[in-house]
Image: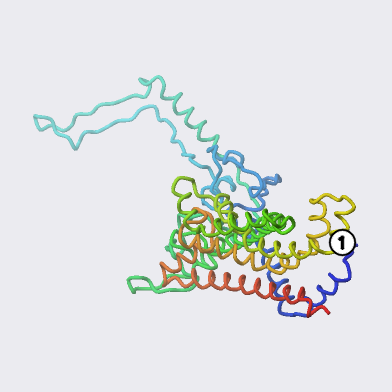
Amino acid sequence: MLKINKELEVKLSVFKKDKRAYFSFFILTFLFLITLPAELICNVRPLLIVLEGKPYFPIIYTYSEKDFGGLLPSEPDYKSTRFLNILKGVPDNFTPMVGNSGSFDIQLDDFEDEDGENDATFSITLDDFEESDEYIDSTVESSSKNYVSPRDPWILWPPVRYDYVYIPTESKTGNVVLAAPYRTRALNGEGFIESSWTDGHYLGTDDRGRDVLARLLYGFRISMIFGASLAITGTLIGCLIGGTQGFFGGGVDLVGQRLTEIWGSIPRLYILIILSSFLVPSAILLFLILNLTAWMGIAAYIRAEFLKIRNFEFVKAAKGLGVSNFTIMRRHILPNALTPVVTFFPFEVTAGILALVSLDYLNLGVPSPAPSIGELLAQGKNNLQALWILLPTFVSLTLTITLLTFIGEGIRNAFDPKKTL
């Protein structure tokens, strides 16, 4: 069983009493856990195919069309009618052959010769063609190989049969791009276009025909992971730099502060634009660039805590016992300086998410076709009539930031000495 000290137990008790922060934490955790197995919720590949008693797992393994009795060595389009016919045993290109009668006659009644006579006839016997029988036999044999006996496959699909990148080639409603999740009037004013629910698009499609729900689900997961990762790495770097400045002080602190001020004056957006001009944009590149300045805020607080705690008696006692500086910083000072780290962590996550969304909105972030909240917001701005793109994206982003803010306020109150006395 996990043991916690009395002081931390008191702080957790204060956090639980803040119902707004407490329930916000569970709601955000629940939403994030739902998006972790996004491939099991939104995917263009079936979860399971049982064919003639043999299970196939397309969501885990990559199969070729030949594995299911088809002709092509490439991965099949699992949603296509052609693939479903292959599973059911419908022949791919089987052509029934007509038996050979041995000869045929052609009557040229419609053609006249120079004398006006039209009774010329001629006869061709297939025996004159030595390879005719062999050709027919080989064609029948080749076509028969593509024919399999009728089968009854069983397919388990995810709730949403689209991923964030799949663009369907056909639609039951006749509308693939910007398909609304409700019934709309046709552009020509004649008739109506059925809801995109008919095709399984529960939040409609974007300006390229991709499923909005799938892109929103995957984009939320990427935003949360990106924001949390950026907050973690920024906190670690900030603790290292700020702790070093605060512990040693003097010239180390003075030089470190001047370098920090110079580095902080360089705008991240300009750095990103310059690097993107000659480097291939990617999530890793964006993550590294944002980490160049993500540590500066927490480093200032850690520096102040170390400057204060380094003069305490237990630190002086550890130095007198010959304990190394690194051990003193790690085991004696840092645990007592974590209050600003824990307090500001949710806000650091919020800052990371907003940074990613802002850069994606400006088309400077994760390159397409990667799912992105910012890219969906940009699509909503460019297609104001497509409310099914803008509203769900705006609501999800606002809800995420609001929940993180409530959690951060709850943690800040829990670590406030005035609230825990």
The quarter of the image holding the N terminus is bottom right
Q: Residues within 10 Å of mark 1 (few under 14, many from 20)?
A: some
How many marks can you see?
A: 1
Considering depth in this image, is 125 or 15 the residue closer to the camera? 15
Badge 1 is on which residue? 314
From the top left corner, tell me how far across and down residue 311 is, in percent.
Answer: 80, 63
Taking the image as shown, residue 168 lies to the left or right of residue 304, namely left
Taking the image as shown, residue 171 lies to the left or right of residue 150, namely left
Picture layout, residue 14 above or below residue 44: below
The residue depicted at 13 percent of the width and 31 percent of the height is 117
Picture layout, residue 256 above or below residue 61: below
The residue depicted at 46 percent of the width and 74 percent of the height is 183
From the top left corner, tell me how far across and down residue 295 is, in percent.
Answer: 63, 58
Picture layout, residue 237 above or below residue 350: above
Label 1: element kind = helix
Considering depth in this image, is 213 or 57 the residue closer to the camera? 213
Q: Quadrant of residue 161?
A: bottom right
The residue depicted at 73 percent of the width and 66 percent of the height is 342
Picture layout, residue 189 above or below residue 239: below
From the top left corner, tell me how far across and down residue 79 is, in percent.
Answer: 54, 53
Considering depth in this image, is 359 or 160 the residue closer to the camera? 359
Q: Quadrant of residue 319?
A: bottom right
Considering depth in this image, is 254 or 301 the residue closer to the camera? 254
The quarter of the image holding the C terminus is bottom right
